[in-house]
Amino acid sequence: MSATGIAPAATPWSTYALLTLAAVFWGGTFVAGRLVSAEIGPFSAAFVRFLLASLLLSGLLLRQGNGFGRLRPRQWGAVVLLGATGVFAYNVLFFTGLRTVEAGRAAVIIAGNPIFIALFSALIFGERLNLAKGIGIVLSVAGAVTVISRGDPLALVQGQVGYGELAILGCVASWVAYTLLGKRVMSGLSALEAVSYSCIAGTALLLLPAWHEGLGAALARLSTTGWGALFYLAFFGTVLGFVWFYQGVRTIGPARAGVFINFVPVSAVIAGGLLLGEPVTLSLLVGGGLVLGGLILANRFG
């Protein structure tokens, strides 16, 4: 068994398989999110997802034998910030956006996360941006604009973009903040500890808004499909997805592991088409191609 207790010790091929599965699971979260958001509110959906995920992650940490590491005073504030950005804000916006935005379209917009992280890392931390990364950023932003505006960039200027697309764009901003905060202040914790702490903090922050939204009534009317989608989001999309991805980062390095994230929008588009009957439009294909092309250019030659 691995250190996580979920998978056997990684060999190169098993690592590639687990990274591919993690990307497929993450693509499926957009379909599951669409199903859940049709039944209950965004605060309730996010709270239940991360309550389940926090319990599962805590079990993994305890099973390792080391349990939870002791946080330094500075790290307590960092944990709350990570929970507020990567769990609270991201997931409320995620479920809000998926009420009106197709799973595949939302996944392509969020696929621009690595590009925006690279851009703001350069602006805030002074990391070097070479020509390849610069061109990759431009291509990916152009692709995101194409997808968000459904092929009509002027719609952005004219204010014709729906709140769902804006909410999904807010997911990108939340995840960039989560990543950059983690990079700066979460040294000294393992990846599993950092994810677990941020999940627990985000769950605590979600409790009161979810209760005010009508959490009890929402859970009472949740269908079997809704519960299944929430379990998928918690176990496959959060626990297995993150653990397997970080296991891949440890085995083959962040650059090579990060390439597998490019499969997320592809799997989301396929799953959305097969399971939800979502159309694959020209703007989605063109925008998705630009986003993926920019990611590959920035990662391969940047």
Image (tube, rainbow, N blue to C red):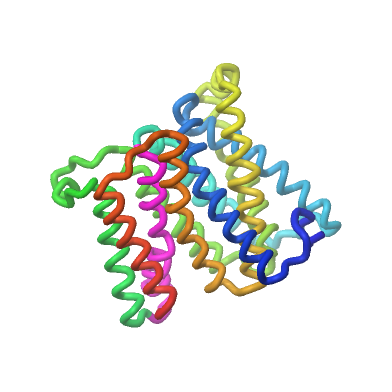
Q: Residue furthest right?
A: 65
Residue 23 position, x and y percent, is 54, 55
Of residue 198 and residue 64, the one placed in the foreground of this image is 64
* Residue 159: quadrant of the picture: top left
In the image, residue 150 sits, relative to residue 262, either above or below, namely above
Residue 212 position, x and y percent, is 51, 25
* Quadrant into which the C terminus falls: bottom left
Count how many numbered circles sit on residues in the image. 0
Left or right of 207, for residue 123: left
* Residue 280: quadrant of the picture: top left
* Quadrant into which the N terminus falls: bottom right
- Prevailing secondary structure of the magenta residues: helix
Left or right of 103, for residue 15: right
In the image, residue 126 sits, relative to residue 218, either above or below, namely below
In the image, residue 100 sits, relative to residue 5, either above or below, namely above
Residue 98 falls within the magenta-colored stretch: no
| Range shown magenta | 101-128
Is residue 204 at least partly visible in the picture?
no
Please report the residue visible at 81 percent of the width from the left and 55 percent of the height from the top: 67
Residue 146 position, x and y percent, is 24, 53
Residue 148 position, x and y percent, is 28, 48
Please report the residue visible at 41 percent of the width from the left and 40 percent of the height from the top: 273
Of residue 101 and residue 43, the one placed in the foreground of this image is 101
Residue 114 falls within the magenta-colored stretch: yes
Left or right of 288, for residue 52: right
* Residue 126: quadrant of the picture: bottom left
Please report the residue visible at 57 percent of the width from the left and 21 percent of the height from the top: 223
Of residue 16 and residue 113, the one placed in the foreground of this image is 16
Is residue 167 at least partly visible in the picture?
yes
